[in-house]
Image (tube, helix red, strand yellow):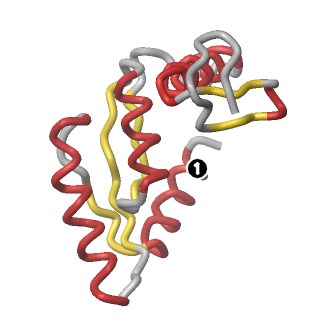
Amino acid sequence: MKRDRCRGVAVIGMLQHGLNLCTEHYLEWIPRMAARAIKRFDMLTQNDCVLIAVSGGKDSLASWVLLYDLGYQTTGRYINLGIANDEYSQRSQECVVAFAPAHGGQPTSAGNLCAFWRLWTRAMERHA
């Protein structure tokens, strides 16, 4: 699969956008689209502090990096998923703690997912 403009090897094809992107152009496209969506739907301002729930997995850490790289003040809230298999959740928390200083400071801990849900529900009720 080739990409039309740069003639590089496409690593991802997105039919809904009519795009085949090489690694370089994909990594440029993602932040541009995220910034566009944030602006279009009036999600955040540059003055907002963004609290990101992170499990230590690639999706939540990528979201954190993306928002940090777009210039938002970010901090992470570690969510312990309670996965005991091979101490997975403990290792995930260690990864988040090591990751945090380069992306907006130290993460806070919400304990487990149930505790986080209670905190989030209370916060939403106060802002309703």
Q: Residue 21 or 95: which is nearer the viewer?
A: 21
Number of residue marks: 1
Give how far across and how far down residue 42 sits, in percent. Answer: 64, 19
Q: Is residue 80 left or right of residue 106?
A: right
Q: Is residue 41 left or right of residue 102?
A: right
Q: Residue at x 25, y 36 (%)?
A: 103
Q: Residue at x 19, y 56 (%)?
A: 97
The image quadrant of residue 100 is: top left
Q: Residue 7 or 86: which is nearer the viewer?
A: 7
Q: Is residue 7 left or right of residue 78?
A: right
Type of the residue with mark 1: Met
The image quadrant of residue 101 is: top left
Q: Which residue in the protein does label 1 denote?
A: 124
**As drawn, 11 above or below 26:** below
Q: Residue at x 46, y 61 (%)?
A: 119
The N terminus lies in quadrant: top right
**As drawn, 21 above or below 117:** above
**As drawn, 12 above or below 21:** below
SS for dot 1: helix
